[in-house]
Image: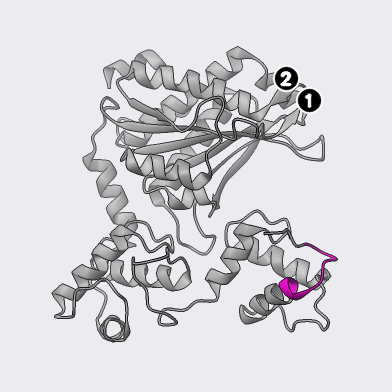
Amino acid sequence: MLLFRRGDSGPAVAEVQVALVHLGLLPAAPEPALFDEQTDSAVREFQQNRGLVADGIVGPETYAALQAARLSLGDRLLSLAGKMYVGDDVAALQERLAELGFDTGRVDGVFGVRTEAALKGLQREYGLVSDGVCGPSTLRALKQLGRLVVGGRPQALRESEALHRSGVALAGKVVVIDPGHGGPDRGATAHGLEEAAIAEDLAARLEGRLTAVGVRTVVTRGADSCPTDGERAGLANEARADLLVSLHVDRSDSPQCHGVATYHFGTGTGTTSTVGEHFASLVQREVVARTDLLDCRVHAKTWQLLRLTQMPAVRLELGHVSHAGDAARLAGPAFRDTVAEALLVAIQRLYLPADLDPPTGVLRLPDLAHL
């Protein structure tokens, strides 16, 4: 698919504008179809609301999100057969099933195996044909039934309980390490640095530390490969990982942009991975406390890797290679060691109860042997 941006015109732009009008973000589609300033603002608002990069460019991810946002529960039959169904109608189904006490996994708008199992559970329990298809009879039942889970968001309660049950010790846990880009895709480059190479080196340092404390690690790629985000998520899901950490650096056209940010799954409209958000906060705080990088905070995004992973996942953007100061730090082995230790400590702190959790920036690798 081509990228569409301000100044473009044609049928594809008209389709984008119709979607924006439907969502109430654009008062009317101009005739003839022109990607004008008003359309640009509407696209950016949609991207911001949906946890996408708010750049005003309609690429594959934004286009798919626009189509998904137009769907309401009942607009189509939903099932696991055939193509993968993705959309706001799926998210609404997942939320409704969760309210009724059925475990769909994360509310991510993707009709997967757990959503099908939850739907079949509902159908069996309420005397419907247990075929895993959300059709008219199932929709009627969903509208008639009252909410059963109270005291908080159902998925947040399940995530927190699963984390509690997994125990404090890191030994035996599975962590997927995802060095960004790879192979011919070198990612952000500047000041003689390549994002892919930095991510590979940092992944190796983190892998060594995790292995030393008994964690089983899975690395999503080698030096010569560049899997898609969907493939990386699939690998993590197949490994039944406890966590995923994706490693990146950033760049900007402005040499003044600098600092570190951490991302977790969230739609920007309230749906989020509660444990993922907490994990991202721990990663961000540990890195900021142990380095002098500018704190660019924690953000919710619906990027494919964060959305498709079935475990808490974070993406670390460790500085800007386009900024001279950040680049100088990123180039140093000692700095990368410090970041690797910060990540290890953040992973451990995620599992610690409040009474054992130390202040940010003080826990060290030798201390983990006693936990």
Task: Between residue 243 and residue 150, name the one nearer to us.
Answer: 243
Image coords of residue 200 (percent x, y): 55, 24
Can I make out residue 104 in this image?
no
Q: In the image as oriented, which residue stretches furthest toward the front?
A: 82
Residue ID at (34%, 70%): 79
Q: In the rendered structure, which segment of residues is drawn in magenta?
A: 5-13
Task: Between residue 154 and residue 219, name the one nearer to us.
Answer: 219
Give the CA distance from mark 1 to mark 2. Answer: 6 Å
* Tag 1 secondary structure: helix
Image coords of residue 148 (percent x, y): 23, 72
* Tag 2 secondary structure: helix
Q: How many marks?
A: 2
Residue ID for mark 2: 328
Residue ID at (16%, 79%): 126
Query: Disc number at residue 183?
Result: none
Query: Disc number at residue 324?
Result: 1
Residue ID at (40%, 82%): 74
Say whether marks 1 and 2 touch (CB < 8 Å).
yes
Residue ID at (24%, 38%): 166
**Badge 1 amino acid:** Ala
Task: Between residue 130 and residue 287, name the one nearer to us.
Answer: 130
Q: In the rendered image, which quarter is residue 35 located in?
A: bottom right
- Main secondary structure type of the part rendered in magenta: loop
Image coords of residue 355 (percent x, y): 30, 33
**Badge 2 amino acid:** Ala
Q: In the rendered image, which quarter is residue 152 located in?
A: bottom left
Which part of the image, by quadrant, shows the N terminus? bottom right
Q: Is 313 one of the magenta-colored residues?
A: no
Q: Residues within 10 Å of mark 1 (few under 14, many from 20)?
A: some
Q: Residues within 10 Å of mark 2 (few under 14, many from 20)?
A: few
